């Protein structure tokens, strides 16, 4: 099987458009779409800082790598990788090592925040998570720490490694649950809320398989360990549904995202950003306390009750 654009051996078949691509042309194919999304989603000016949420997995490492190729040579733009240590023994430490070494080699600023700052660790949370899956707490606490750190370093934007699969799954989850207001708040964020660093998703049009292949052919190091609490996530059910749709009708994930993009302006008009106040922890919130503080309080009660 040969590349459609040269005589080199193809490394992949892009099922949704029928293209056979070699390693070089596949990298160009991915990078072109990612760079287009970056230009579309953010407006960068001299002196700006871009924070990048980096777990050490394939998607976040690919995101950091491509952002570095785009902005790394610009002395007037700063990148800073933000990693979160959730407190999962045997899983998180190896990935943090990969991020640290990669950033040191590239000269990228990096920092690590930890759940231990809140006197919480996922290995302990998982044992008292109650009716919620451990992932519920993990997601809320990670978002809190990432936003806090991005705000602390004066970042204008916060990039995440959400790929096409992630986006399609999130859209399906919110449709099925009838949470239309949450749909309106999905990133990338265009309206800036005080205290919230707007997130953007450079890989939102890159399928997960392409992100993995790109990391391999580009020689980007990444951690492929599986979180021990992964199977308890509700998202897995939607991942299976979306994958089945894609298998039967290649391009379904793109269609889901394109349909959402068409609806988003109407959703945003119907559900405008609400006024925020500051929680006692410093994070913006709709109520008296932010979700992270509410969950932390409930966990502390469960721990004391043991």
Image (cartoon, grey):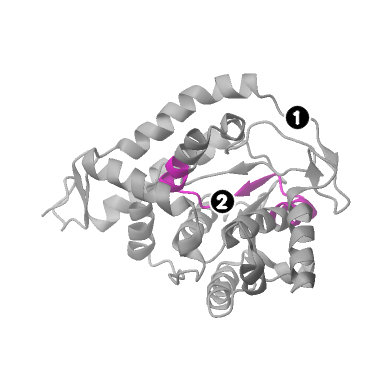
Is 157 situated above or below 176?
Answer: below
For the record, the magenta segment spans: 146-169
The reply to whether the magenta stretch includes residue 300 is no
User: Is residue 80 at least partly visible in the picture?
Assistant: no
Q: Earlier in the sequence, mark 2 or mark 1?
A: 2
Inter-mark Cα distance, 2 to 1: 23 Å
Q: Residue 235, position in %: x, y?
A: 47, 51
- Determine which residue is flagged by label 2: 160
Is there CB contact under 8 Å for labels 2 and 1?
no
Element class at badge 2 = loop
**Label 1 environment density (alpha carbons within 10 Å; few <14, some 14–19, many ≥20):** few
In depth, the one of 83 and 114 nearer the eye is 114
Residue at the (42%, 27%) spot, across then down? 259
Element class at badge 1 = loop
Q: Quadrant of residue 142?
A: bottom right
Farthest residue in the right direction?
A: 280
Is 66 situated above or below 251?
Answer: below
- Determine which residue is flagged by label 1: 274
Farthest residue in the bottom direction?
A: 90
Residue at the (72%, 34%) spot, across then down? 192
Residue at the (36%, 36%) spot, across then down? 254
């Amino acid at each position: 099987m040969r590349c459609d654009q040269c005589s080199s051996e193809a490394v992949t078949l892009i099922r949704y458009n029928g293209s056979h691509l070699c390693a070089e042309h596949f990298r160009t194919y991915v990078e072109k779409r990612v760079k287009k999304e970056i230009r579309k989603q953010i407006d960068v000016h001299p002196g700006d800082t871009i924070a990048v949420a980096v777990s050490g997995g394939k998607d976040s490492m690919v995101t950091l790598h491509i952002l570095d190729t785009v902005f790394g040579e610009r002395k007037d733009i700063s990148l800073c990788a933000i990693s979160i240590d959730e407190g999962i023994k045997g899983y998180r430490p190896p990935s943090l090592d990969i991020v640290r070494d990669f950033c040191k080699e590239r000269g990228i600023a990096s920092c690590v925040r930890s759940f231990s700052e809140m006197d919480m660790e996922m290995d302990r949370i998982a044992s008292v998570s109650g009716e919620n899956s451990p992932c519920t707490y993990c997601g809320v606490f990670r978002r809190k720490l990432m936003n806090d750190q991005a705000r602390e370093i004066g970042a204008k934007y916060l990039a995440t490694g959400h790929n096409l699969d992630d986006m399609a799954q999130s859209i399906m989850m919110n449709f099925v649950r009838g949470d239309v207001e949450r749909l309106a708040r999905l990133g990338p964020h265009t309206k800036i809320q005080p205290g919230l660093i707007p997130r953007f998703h450079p890989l939102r049009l890159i399928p997960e398989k392409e992100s993995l292949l790109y990391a391999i052919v580009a020689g980007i190091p990444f951690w492929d360990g599986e979180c021990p609490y992964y199977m308890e996530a509700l998202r897995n059910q939607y991942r299976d549904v979306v994958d089945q749709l894609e298998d039967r009708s290649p391009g379904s994930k793109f269609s889901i995202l394109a349909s959402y993009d068409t609806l988003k302006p109407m959703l945003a008009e119907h559900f405008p950003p609400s006024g925020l106040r500051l929680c006692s922890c410093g994070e913006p919130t709709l109520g008296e306390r932010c979700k992270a503080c509410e969950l932390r309080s409930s966990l502390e009660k469960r721990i004391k009750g043991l």
